Amino acid sequence: MKIITDKSRAKFIITTSVIALILLLESPLSWNYYDVNYFVTWDYILKNYGIFHVYKYSTKVAYPPLSIFIFVSMYELALSFSTVSTALPMIRLFVKIPLIASIVAIAYILYRYYGWKSTKWLYLSYGLYSTVFGYQFDLITALGIVLTLIFIYRKKNYLLAGMSFSLSLLTKHLTIILIPLIFYDIYSNRKLRGILEFLMGLLIIGVPTTVPFLIYSFKEFIEKVLLFHSNRYPQDLSIYAIPVYYYAYVLHRINDIPSYLKWIWIPIFIAAYTITVTCILKKARISEECGYIRYAIILLLSILLNKIGNNPYYVWPLPLLAIIMAKYGEKKKLLKTAYIITPIISMFVYPFLTLFSAAVVNSGYFIVEDLKFYNAYMLYALSFVGSPNTFAIKFLELNREYLFSIYKLLYDNIWLVIAILTALYLSLLAYMIRYLTTLHKSTCTECCYIHKKARV
């Protein structure tokens, strides 16, 4: 049972306040221009056609509807408070407020229910800060997941659990992979009635959020939210993406990229997912601690085997990993190393050695989604345009002046760099999955939980 002391309360309040303040001060400086450039078109469509036509007229909108509502509402709010000269920094600040609020909310939940140690481990992850810097909705997804589990395990309120899970499902719909585990936990406690309450909670949020978009643009909704992910090639830190980058950077034959790379991951993922879910639920103990381990395993597995190795996906299991680290990670050096280094590799080292290197040498950067090269310097510079200071540009120019040959070497071997980083990143994910699987087997199955100290 966790103990909240005046000392831990002070640590939580001071640390959370400082981190929130730093993130608020940083927010106006930057974002990921490539992604946000598409998000801004949602606001243009809102003003000219109405928000429910976003899927019809937007060039790219591969997100469920809640993401659209969150961005355009904060974007419009920012415009109402800004002038021409302050518009861009003000917009960056306002649109990031829901992300910062999500961090504070997750931290408070962890502190209230699991103590200061779990909150400390949460704050030690670079993944939190990188997701705010670049701007993505994954922190809201993570908040929805942890709220769902609190309502399932602590509150036994399955209606609110369903409403909470809609935060995740309506920002990043891949989180549907958690449904079998959720149903298992709810059915074990409240049988069918609990599942019906959960589904009702999902419908309360999901119907008014989604149905209007389906009415106005059903075909485009299906094409851009669901089929887009089916038809896109693998990208970023995914094992399936390595051949794609080889064709782009080494062979310079983008049009010859094998089409089977779009779908080859599906049977592998389905088989691994089915086996894993079946194994971890077989004779599984129904407990809060064991549940968190199971959910973390499935989320990490989805990142490991997904064809889209987007960096912020790692944020989804992060609150659960922080809880697990607080209890089991203090004396596990390799686990601590994996926990700390994994997001640094994916969210800092990877873009630094690829996009930033390409920007320094003023060369092309391959965007898999569009199957085309973009000027890397343009992508980098536009991510900071309108910033109150020019540190980012000066930093690039200094590197260009003094370390150009090193960055040229990196860019000339960018495919090899991507392959090495992908292998390292996936190896760390695989290690965490292996550790959690062993932990679950030794503590969370009916036949052997009494020996939980023996094999962890």
Image (spheres, grey):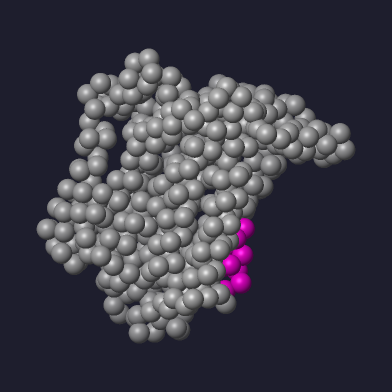
| Depth check, front residue: 235 or 24 | 24
Residue lying at 22% horizontally and 64% vertically, measured from the top left? 156
State the residue in front, 16 or 411: 16
Q: What residue appears at the point 24 percent right and 27 percent down from the top-left corner?
A: 212
Q: Which residue lies at the image location 72% right of the left edge and 31% below the top edge?
A: 359
Q: Is residue 185 visible?
A: no
For the residue pair 68 and 303, the one nearer the viewer reads as 68
35 relative position to 333: left or right:
left
Query: Please, is residue 53 above or below residue 128 in the view?
Result: above
Residue 358: x and y, percent? 72, 32
Q: Residue at left 57%, top 77%? A: 331
Q: Is residue 87 above or below residue 356?
A: above
Query: Residue 342 occupies which quadrant of the picture?
Result: bottom right
Judged from this view, the residue extending furthest toward the right is: 402
Residue 83 appears in the figure: yes
Numbered range of the magenta stretch: 332-341
